[in-house]
Image (cartoon, rainbow, N blue to C red):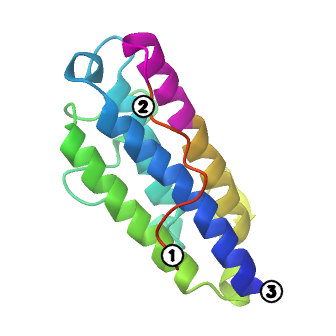
Amino acid sequence: MIDTLKEIIWHQFGASIDMLENAIAMCPEELWDNNDKFWYNAYHCIFFLDYYLTLEPEKFTPPPPFSLSEFKSAEMPERTYTKEELITYTHFCRNKCHDLFAGMTEDIANMRWKNEWRDYSIMEIIIYNMRHVQHHAAQLNLLLRQGMNDAPKWVSKTKVNL
C-alpha cells in the first residue's frame, strides 16, 4: 500500500512543482520585479518547499546563492533573484522531493517534523507543503493573467516517475 500512495502523492506533488516552474518560466521581464513582486512570491514558495522537504528542519540551509532571510519576517532577500536562479532552485527541490518519495518508508512517513510552529508527521508536512506550493502557483498564475492575460496550462500529473 505504501508504494501505491508514494507514487500517487509524488505524481500530484510533482505536478504542483511543475505548475510553479511553468508560471516562473512564463513570466515576462516587465512583470518579474513590478509592484506585485512576482519573483519574491516565487522565491518564498521555493524556499519553503525546500525547507519543508528537509527531514531535520533545524539543519536546513538553502543552496547558494540563497540565504535564510525568509525566516526574518520583515527582511527581503539581499537582491532580486533571476528567473534562471529560481528555475534552478525549483529543479533542486523537485529532485529533493522525488528522492524523498523514492526512499520513503513507513518509518520515515511517521517520523516527526518539528519546528517552533509545527509538529507534523513527515507525511503531513508533505501534504501541507504540496498545498503551499499549489497556493503560490495559483497566485503566480493570477498575476500572469492580470499582467499579460495568459497563464500556463493545468498539469494533471508530473511526467517524472518514481
Residue 139 percent coordinates (x, y): 53, 27
Secondary structure at badge 3 equals loop
**Residue in the image at 62% along x and 59% along y:** 12
Question: Mark 2–mark 3 contact, CB under 8 Å?
Answer: no
Q: Is residue 14 left or right of residue 26?
A: right
**Relative image position of residue 153 (x, y in whole percent):** 50, 37
Dot 1 alpha-carbon crowd within 10 angstroms: few under 14, some 14 to 19, many 20 or more? few
22 is higher (above) or lower (below) than 2: above
Badge number at residue 41: 2
Tell me the quarter of the picture where residue 11 sits.
bottom right
Q: Which of 42 and 120 lies nearest the eye of the viewer?
A: 42
What residue type is disc 1 on? Asn
Number of other residues with Cα within 10 Å of mark 3, as a class: few under 14, some 14 to 19, many 20 or more: few
Which quadrant is the N terminus positioned in? bottom right
The residue wearing badge 3 is 1
Q: Is residue 3 magenta?
A: no
Region rendered in magenta: 136-150
As for residue 147 lying within the magenta part, the answer is yes
Task: Give the residue at mark 1.
Answer: 161
* Residue 39, label in figure: none
Estimate the x, y position of residue 135 in percent, counting from the top left: 60, 37
Label 2 sits on what residue type? Asn
Q: Nearer the viewer, residue 91 or 46?
A: 91
Residue 12 lies, with reference to residue 28, above or below; the image says: below
